[in-house]
Amino acid sequence: MYNDFQKHLTDELTAIKEAGLYKEERIIVTPQSSGIKLNTGKDVVNFCANNYLGLADNPELIEAAKAAMATHGYGMSSVRFICGTQDLHKQLEKAIADYFGTEDTILYAACFDANGGVFEPLLTEQDAIISDTLNHASIIDGVRLCKAQRYRYANADMEDLEEQLKKAQAQRFRLIVTDGVFSMDGNVAPMDKIYELAQKYNAMVMVDESHSAGVVGKTGRGVTEQYDLRGKIEIITGTLGKAFGGAVGGFTTGKKEIIAMLRQRSRPYLFSNSIPPMIAAAAIRMFKMITESNELQDRLHANTEYFVGQMKAAGFDIKPTQSAICAVMLYDAKLAQEVAAKLLDEGIYVTGFSYPVVPQGQARIRVQVSAAHTREQLDLCVAAFKKVLGK
Ligand SMILES: *Cc1c(COP(=O)(O)O)cnc(C)c1O
């Protein structure tokens, strides 16, 4: 049997390579940071990490993680409800709720799990989920696991959302679901209008703040801060794996009855291990740090404004962005890979994105700005793009 299957896989993999869609992994031998070294010995400036606040190698967080290993051990060897809940997990859940202005929080091993486990326990075939077409894969998978009626609206298209909400009046409960920042374009969901429509058509709202938390809004509290909706959104999901230190872990935060039900019924919570104490402790410290000082958020905003300004001035085809994501459009998948490779030669580490991560014919290079980037590093990146793309 395996011989046939092996040939099938080899053929498929060859086809992926020939289409320029094969994803190679580069190997980093230093901590994650704005400047990193690859196993080839090459030093590069990193513009493709989700390390928005530059916390991935923060000494204070490393210290907090080490201290927690001494006091709370290495791993939990249990799911939360059996014997996997430490004081640290409860403290972190409270810190997240305080940060977002919500009632309660439930932790997961990843935001992929938070999204995978949020719909099925809450909604049935009597209900409706109205989802943005550009929502993250984990939301799409989560929706698939739920029996609710599915409606999709074009990315951030409020006329389409209204149409779908009208149709969804046939169902009992309605939940609108959106990413806060769409990770491939960097645009922000129009939460003010989404909230208005939710009020008008009697729907609840869920927003995934994975790329917006720590980034969008004056103090980085995400799109609910940007649109003055603190405490008004029923469900927020997010990750500890991006701006918030970049380790691992996800959460759902929001109305307390929703969180209570998820603790009873959410499968990735019930059937998957607790996050380790060192992550919980470092995350608690991280929320304290970014609440006490807005320095990193301010620096990220200044860096992003500067970088996008320079790229626009140079005449590059850039998707309108309101986040730390800057998508440089090249459209052709092979070209995007080639340009990324040439930029690497220039010491700039970026990734080309092509189908299936973005639609066919929409290949691009995504640049992600960090608070950790120096002005000099940002200038190097702009200069490298100019050289490689001949501007
Ligand atoms: C990255 C991301 C996730 C997944 O987060 P993990 O914690 O890495 O699983 C989920 N949703 C969105 C919108 C993301 O960008």
Image: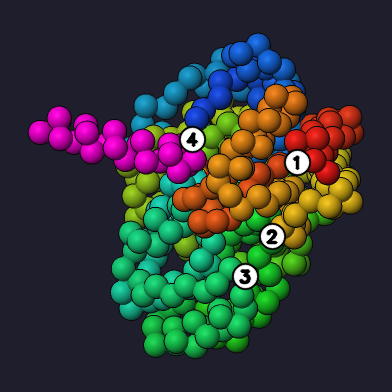
Up the image or down, 171 lies above or below 143; here it is below
The residue under the point 51% across, 56% down is: 360
Q: Quadrant of residue 195?
A: bottom right
Q: Are marks 3 and 4 in contact (CB under 8 Å)?
A: no
Please state which amino acid type lies under the numbered disc 1: Leu
Task: Please tell me how crowded label 1 is: few (under 14), some (14-19), or many (20+) other residues with Cα within 10 Å.
Answer: few
The residue under the point 61% across, 53% down is: 331
State whether the magenta stretch is mostly helix, strand or loop: helix
Percent coordinates x, y for residue 239 in the rendering: 57, 44
Q: Are marks 1 and 2 in contact (CB under 8 Å)?
A: no
- Find residue 322 and name its label: none
Residue under circle 2? 187
Front-lying residue, 331 or 115: 331
Task: Report, in whole angstroms, how far the alpha carbon at label 1 lies from the one at label 3.
Answer: 31 Å
374 in magenta:
no
Task: Please tell me how crowded label 4 is: few (under 14), some (14-19), or many (20+) other residues with Cα within 10 Å.
Answer: few
In front of the other: label 2 or label 4?
4
- The local secondary structure at tag 1 comes to helix
Up the image or down, 279 lies above or below 301; here it is above
Left or right: residue 376 compared with residue 371:
right
Task: Report, in whole angstroms, how far the alpha carbon at label 2 lies from the one at label 3.
Answer: 9 Å
Q: Are marks 2 and 4 in contact (CB under 8 Å)?
A: no
The residue under the point 61% across, 13% down is: 40
Residue under circle 4? 23
Left or right: residue 55 compared with residue 235:
right
Residue under circle 3? 156
Residue under circle 1? 389
